[in-house]
Image (cartoon, coloured by chain):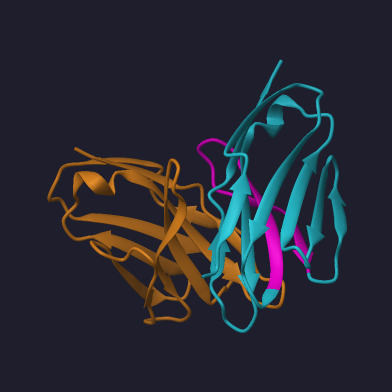
Chain colours: A cyan, B orange
Amino acid sequence: KNQVEQSPQSLIILEGKNCTLQCNYTVSPFSNLRWYKQDTGRGPVSLTIMTFSENTKSNGRYTATLDADTKQSSLHITASQLSDSASYICVVRGQAGTALIFGKGTTLSVSS
Amino acid sequence: DVKVTQSSRYLVKRTGEKVFLECVQDMDHENMFWYRQDPGLGLRLIYFSYDVKMKEKGDIPEGYSVSREKKERFSLILESASTNQTSMYLCASFKAGANGELFFGEGSRLTVL
């Protein structure tokens, strides 16, 4: 069964600290993986996409990694800010019409 | 910028009422989706549509129906609202292609009393 598991479920960190969110999937065959950020009361917005051939991709203070062999992705946030407080959702797409598979998300709280 | 607009941000309805949630996108995307989002359960797919007048059931279609009369508009209908349909409802349109992306609306928070 195609599944996406995210960990931790929630995380609290101090402003300025780094953190890493994990996404493990069983979707096969794999096409791509997206990380979305969802601010409280808003719709999710795409942060980055990882395709099969990509290992690392940065978007400002956000760095995503992908290990297609172990079917794992991570989202690393550097020098966290209060505005990073949000839910982060991992979405995996399989090939050839496979549905988008959503993780349940990680809720990050950054405190001052 | 792609814009997905949901007609109501907050609604309060009574059990048994008929509820319409409207969603409009301005990027000519063929695929549109309705999800509900609940704490601890993540986003779950209710219905999706890949073309005008076409619809497909998602993972949790019971108690819902949809309408897609025009390409830009996708409506979610609760024929007889129940308290267990209290939730956040998110509409999305999908930019097709190898690296297709979902564009979400701001969400409609529905409370059924």
Residue B5 percent coordinates (x, y):
49, 54
Residue B10 percent coordinates (x, y):
36, 40
In the figure, is residue A8 to the left or right of A82?
left
Q: Is residue B76 above or below residue A86?
A: below
Residue B93 percent coordinates (x, y):
54, 66
Q: Is residue B76 above or below residue B39?
A: below
Residue B101 image-quadrant placement:
bottom right
**Which region shows up in magenta?**
A31-51
Q: Residue at x 41, y 75 (%)?
A: B70
Front-most of residues B24 and A90: A90
Residue A108 percent coordinates (x, y):
64, 33
Front-most of residues B105 and B43: B43
Front-most of residues B1 and A108: A108
Quarter the C terminus of chain B occupies? top left
In the figure, is residue B95 to the left or right of A16?
left
Q: Residue at x 57, y 39 (%)?
A: A9
Q: Is residue B25 among the parts visible in the rendering?
A: yes
Q: Residue at x 47, y 75 (%)?
A: B71
Front-most of residues B52 and B34: B34
What secondary structure predominates along the stretch shown in magenta?
strand
